[in-house]
Image (spheres, helix red, strand yellow):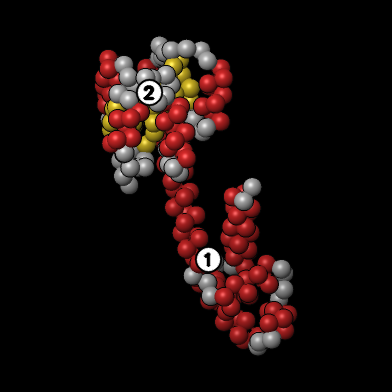
Amino acid sequence: MQEPTVYIVDDDADLRDSLRWLMETVGLRVRAFGTAAEFLRESPPDGPGCLVFDVRMPGKSGLDLFEELVGRGEGRPAIFMTAFADVPMAIRAMKSGAVEFVEKPFNRQELLDKVQRAIDEDARRRALLVDREAIDARFRSLTEKEREVLDLIKGGLPNKAIAARLAITPRAVEMRRAGLMRKLAARSLAELLRLAYGRDAEGSEAGR
């Protein structure tokens, strides 16, 4: 797995260097930028890790930068730093998907803990995406005839009823059923239904 990276964007050079040193003392890989424009110019790939952005900077703010990244479909979690207690901005940050919002000056260990939690959250998110993509690929491999059988199995019909509904032999139903179970790597009817209903639920959530 690719090594996680902490991406820091802060216009304060001293703080930026201090944060880089802090992250590196615990073995974290770091890339630091002075402005949002510099970050976008470098265009770091959407690899594992987290973002540590200063909220208020000349030009594009850290929050504006994060919202732009979210709009592009990039999913790294973000921690926002600010020297001001700004409740509306904190709410906006959280609604945008930020995992933390910290006020300067902050406790170094507390920040490290927040960064590690963000990295762990990103790792879980990426693992889940890989699992979903693998499951989606299995479902895409089904033939149209296998999908027909699967839909009727989900409806609770036994093989003979499925055969009658599709005007095919029970043996043909068994073959299609065996094929779709093999492609979906389902070892039992219960597992097959769990996969199918789980995918339906994810589709419903995505459509909301």
Q: Secondary structure at mark 1?
A: helix
Q: Would residue 194 be found to the left or right of residue 131 on screen?
A: right
Residue that mark 2 sits on: 59
| Horizontal relation, residue 108 to residue 161: left or right | left
Q: Nearer the viewer, residue 5 or 39?
A: 39
Which one is in front, 193 or 50?
50
Disc marking residue 139: 1
Return the residue found at the far front.
59
Does residue 19 appear in this view?
no
Residue type indicated by callout 2: Gly
**Residue 173 location, x and y as percent?**
62, 81
Say which quarter of the image contains residue 147: bottom right
Kind of residue sitting beneath label 1? Phe
- Counting labels gives 2
| Label annotation for residue 81 | none
Q: At numbered mark 2, what does the secondary structure look like: helix, strand or loop?
A: loop
Please identify the quarter of the rendering in which residue 191 is found.
Answer: bottom right
Q: Residue drawn at (40%, 11%), measured in percent from left and top?
A: 105
